[in-house]
Image: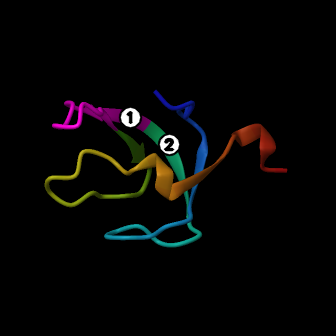
Amino acid sequence: MSDWQVGDLAVCVEASGPLVLHRGYTVIGFTVAPAQRDGKVLEGLLLSGLRLPRGYVGCDPRRFRKIRPDERD
């Protein structure tokens, strides 16, 4: 699992679909999809203010740079 935590600020560094480049989103939860044929489990971020299209289980954490709330200042 990644080291993302609820409350972290996720700044988009690679936009696709409903994501907006350089926009900040607050992490509100996580999803885990079953292992794919290569054996990798897919993790996803659930983000405030972001409505995911049908079929999406969460946003790929690699598309974001993490900023913890205590690092914003």
Q: Is residue 56 left or right of residue 61?
A: left
Magenta run includes residue 37: yes
Query: Where does the image place residue 61, in percent across and percent down from the top left?
Result: 46, 47
**Is label 1 in a helix, a strand or a loop?**
strand
Report which quarter residue 18 is drawn in: bottom left
Query: Where does the image place residue 10, in percent across and percent down from the top left?
Result: 57, 51
The residue at the far right in this view is 73
Find out whether the residues at labels 1 and 2 contact each other: C-beta distance under 8 Å.
yes
**Is label 2 in a helix, a strand or a loop?**
strand
Magenta run includes residue 33: yes
The residue at the far front in this view is 38
The residue at the far top in this view is 1
Mark 1–mark 2 Cα distance, whole angstroms, equals: 8 Å
Residue kind at label 1, given as amino acid type: Phe
Q: Residues within 10 Å of mark 1 (few under 14, many from 20)?
A: some
Q: Is residue 59 left or right of residue 69?
A: left
Name the residue at 41% across, 43% down. Answer: 45
Q: Is residue 73 left or right of residue 49?
A: right
Q: Residues within 10 Å of mark 2 (few under 14, many from 20)?
A: some
Disc 2 target residue: 27
Q: Which of the two residues, 42 or 56, is positioned nearer the viewer here?
A: 42
Query: Where does the image place residue 73, in percent across and percent down from the top left?
Result: 85, 50
**Residue 24, above or below 35:** below
**Which stretch did the figure color magenta?**
29-42
Q: Which mark is residue 68?
A: none
Q: Is residue 39 left or right of residue 13?
A: left
Report which quarter residue 49 is drawn in: bottom left
Disc 1 target residue: 30
Q: Which of the two residues, 26 or 64, is positioned nearer the viewer here?
A: 64
Name the residue at 51% across, 32% down. Answer: 2
Query: Where does the image place residue 28, in percent across and percent down from the top left?
Result: 45, 39
The colour scheme is rainbow
